[in-house]
Amino acid sequence: MGCLTQLYSPVLVCSSTQIEFHAFPHQSLRSFIVDPLTNAFPSSQSLCVFDSFSTCCLVCCGIPKMAPRTRVIIDTDPGNDDVLALLYALASSPEDIEVLLISIAFGNVNVQNCLRNAVSMFHVIEKEMRWRKEHGRPEGFEALKKSKPVIAVGADEPLGGKRVQAAYYHGADGLGGVHTSHPHHTSPSETWQHLFDRPPPDTVPSSTATTTTTTKPASTSPTSPLFTPSSSPAHLEILNILDREPPQTITLIAIGPLTTFATAAAHAPTTFLKAKSLLVMGGAIAVPGNMTPVAEFNALADPIAAARIYALTSPAPQSTMPPFNPATTSLTDYPPPAHLGAQRLRVVKFPLDITTPHSLRRDEVLATVEPLRALGSPLAEWVMAFTEQGFRTTEALNVGFEDGGGDTWVSLHDPVVLWFAVATGGEGRMMEGWEVVRGEDVRVETVGQWTRGMCVVDGRDRKKRVEGEGGRGRGRGRWRGIWGIG
Ligand SMILES: [Ca+2]
């Protein structure tokens, strides 16, 4: 079943997580990349490239567009589909979404390559807006124009184990070699290489501080009109925002490994728990993984970070924490529940089960994006370059794509999460037409030789305890406390 997995603060006295599965309107996202670029035509009713997309989806699904604006922090490892997701968010209506911070971390490739891709994306957007203006078209990117996001650099290594990358799919540069094939669209090196240089150590906030007071910009490098670079570590920028904004108003979005969010949570858990919710692309529940037979990439890249984050959905976080090993993680345990307060983290998880079916076909791109490329759109040229590389890689790696051609498709894993954030206000309280199944229990394997990053789903029909019901011994929900596991 295509599903949306939602973990949130469990209602059980036990430590098990609870999950909701939602049927998802698959077809609605198929036009994700098509509509944005098509809508750049002056004939469109939309003033920005992606704005009418969400409206289109909601109309198609018969869902009234009533969600409030979502204020978000996005942690990302760009990456082909990361870039598409970011473009979608930044080109949405400012009434739907405000992107406060883009946190760049390792994942598909190392953090420097991810940073170059993100900064180059803004470089291309700048060129695209200029091109549209020169040709009498709406500039688009209304959310971006209304609110200039901060960009900060986060983790470059997982909390434990070796760094796993997805260069086999995304290319060594993370965007299918676009910096070699289309170097004119790459941000000048002086813009991205030193824009985020850290200040001298004596001006860096203490690693134990919960917040800093201001974003620390680089001093001498040229800046972008479209974003504010920060020289503060991304996890501190995340805590800055959560500290200064009212509780339960900021939605965190993870479309890469969870390392930076886990680091923020470890430094200041009570501040981190001020987040409204955390939307996570990652994991594979009832489908095979895309990196190993059982593991999805983001979960495999840092399962310890994922387990630490998911533990915060429990009233007893320690009971589902990964085994602490000072040799493999520098982060300490969370304080006891009494010190964390009553708030628990609400995690909405988007596993491969629901993201994979949201696909983009080559013939759709050729029919709608190619004409714009031919007219000279910088964005269309850039997007076509790395999506075409994605099609070719898909044909080379997978069974069933031997013939190539227009039927070849790639999945839009990360854009699904941003679509959800825009369409629902991050609430997850959707939606007519969605099926919801509650009460599942999902945990992440952190140490297995062949199962690292696997989502372990307790689908047994054992009875669960309910809130207020006591348990014998170490009994915890269906797990019954075997081996001391909650
Ligand atoms: Ca990603």
Image (tube, rainbow, N blue to C red):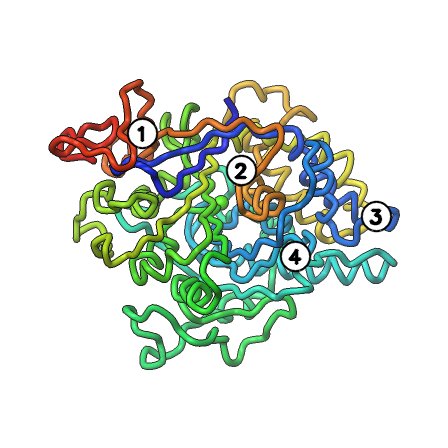
Measured along the vertical axis of the image, is residue 68 above or below residue 456?
below
- The crowd level at tag 2 (other Cα within 10 Å; few <14, some 14-19, many 20+) is many
State yes or no: Cβ of the residue under disc 2 lies below 8 Å from any atom of ligand 1. yes
Q: Nearer the viewer, residue 345 or 390?
A: 345
Q: Which residue is identified by label 1?
A: 456
Quadrant including the C terminus: top left
Q: Which residue is identified by label 4?
A: 185
Which of marks 3 and 2 precedes in the sequence? 3
Q: Amino acid at mark 4?
A: His
Residue 344, image x, y percentages: 35, 49
Instruction: Give the alpha-carbon distance from disc 1 to disc 3, as whole Å.
Output: 46 Å
Instruction: Give the alpha-carbon distance from disc 2 to disc 1, as whole Å.
Output: 21 Å
Mark 3 and mark 2 in contact (Cβ < 8 Å)?
no
Which numbered mark, 2 or 1, is in the foreground of this view?
Answer: 1
Q: Which residue is identified by label 3?
A: 45
Which numbered mark, 4 or 1, is in the foreground of this view?
Answer: 1
Which of marks 4 and 3 precedes in the sequence? 3
Q: Amino acid at mark 3?
A: Gln
Q: Outermost residue, front direction?
A: 468
- Residue at x-position 78% and y-position 59%: 139
Mark 4 and mark 2 in contact (Cβ < 8 Å)?
no
Q: Which residue is identified by label 2?
A: 413
- Res 32 → quadrant: top right
Which numbered mark, 2 or 3, is in the foreground of this view?
Answer: 3
Q: Amino acid at mark 2?
A: His
Which numbered mark, 2 or 4, is in the foreground of this view?
Answer: 2
Instruction: Give the alpha-carbon distance from disc 3 to disc 4, as whole Å.
Output: 28 Å
- The crowd level at tag 1 (other Cα within 10 Å; few <14, some 14-19, many 20+) is some
Q: Outermost residue, left direction?
A: 473
Q: Amino acid at mark 1?
A: Val
